[in-house]
Amino acid sequence: MNKRNPWAWVPTLYFAEGLPYVAVMTISLIMYKRLGLSNTDITLYTSWLYLPWVIKPLWSPFIDIIKTKRWWIVTMQLLIGAALGGVAFTIPGPYWLQGSLAFFWLMAFSSATHDIAADGFYMLGLNQNRQAYFVGIRSTFYRIATIVGQGLLVMLAGNLEVLTRNIKFSWSLMFYGMAGLFIAFWLYHSYVLPRPSEDRGIERMSSQQILQEFWMTLKTFVQKPQVWAGICFMLFYRMPEGLLAKVSALFLIDTRHNGGLGLSPAEYGLVQGTVGVIGLTLGGILGGIVASRDGLKRWLWPMVMAITLPDLVYVYLSYAMPQSLVIVNACVFIEQFGYGFGFSAYMLYLIYYSQGEHKTAHYALCTAFMALSMMIPGLFAGALQESVGYPAFFLIVIATCSLTYIVTWFLKIDPEFGKKQQD
């Protein structure tokens, strides 16, 4: 393969992987709220956008036999750029909702496909030693993409609203900027990505053989010990977060007349997109450190408490309605730090459950359940909130935390799993 310094492409590749996901899952949420859509409609429409990540395992095997992973990466980046441009173009028009949703769907499927190709290409483009070295770097730039998307880009759109006095035009300009960025990624990666000799369209397996392999993967997945306990854990461990994620963002920017905190897009970008993401990242790092030292089983219940109890800060915010941005930042930091720490248990369990034969395919199925666990609660979260109000909704979220404790109770985990092995 032609040699390329991994620093030339790994950071930009994973930044490009993270940004469209943030655009689909978070930026769309804020934009639709600013354009006057109800919480019910926002959560319903945007939760359906999880679907490509839910069904991703269905088409991931075919990426190996149709073109190269490098081809998939650059093609999907071009499609993502086109989808971003389509969102920007449709926002000022009369059919802005239908048009923007159609392009968000294109972006979601392109982004999910890009994820598959990029993660596979990472293993082909680097040797094992460099894969280990750059694993932290790739996750760092994915997080940077999250901060840029939820933080800086939302702030930019908010500042443009102030300058132009036109909400639709401001968000349209921001999405045109993102489209230009992805056209640049497409051009850059078309040139800079290496061409590993192993990266080629695999023709040794027919579509029928791939389907047979897929059914074998499903069969072995459901034959694992504790399959029902595992699936219930994957689906319900994050039930409170599935309800909270979208509504908490809407609560932060909703008007005080409607029971929200009334943050501007710029303030939201600071609170949720910057301080919150930093808290999430630090919590995740701490979770990984303690689990590698003492094992997942030792820290499982502290992580369960970390992912549930900090949700109480939204109960406080919805009743106290503080004016201080410092207090709001502190509360969001606490909740996101707890979520990052507690989410470590979830990710480690997916790895634990996937062990054995077909572990890569089994892990892909586990991540499909992970996406489904966020999609299902999100579909009706907005309708539930609008029927009971923000304070009662956040109390319901706290009540659903009981599901997290119940599904965790039935797990059986090897005490040695996750511990760093002594040489």
Image (spheres, grey):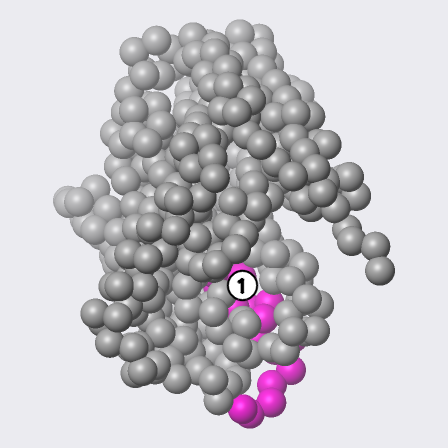
Residue sitting at x 41%, y 63% = 116
Count the labels in the image. 1
Mark 1 = which residue? 14
Residue sitting at x 43%, y 12% = 396
Q: Does the magenta stretch include residue 14?
A: yes
Specify start and end residues of the magenta stretch as a single range.
1-17
For badge 1, the amino acid type reads Tyr
How far across and how far down the image is residue 212, in percent? 26, 63
How far across and how far down the image is residue 164, in percent? 39, 45
Q: Relative to residue 46, is residue 420 depicted above or below?
A: below
Quarter containing the C terminus:
bottom right
Q: Give the camera-side residue of 402 and 208.
A: 208
How far across and how far down the image is residue 397, in percent? 46, 17
Q: Give the camera-side residue of 164 and 52.
A: 52
Q: Is residue 37 magenta?
A: no
Q: Relative to residue 93, is residue 15 depicted above or below?
A: below
Q: Residue most toward the bottom?
A: 2
Residue 252 visible within the image = no
Residue sitting at x 47%, y 35% = 226
Q: Give the camera-side residue of 263 and 394.
A: 394
Quarter containing the N terminus:
bottom right
Q: Relative to residue 414, is residue 209 depicted above or below?
A: below
Magenta stretch mostly in which secondary structure? helix
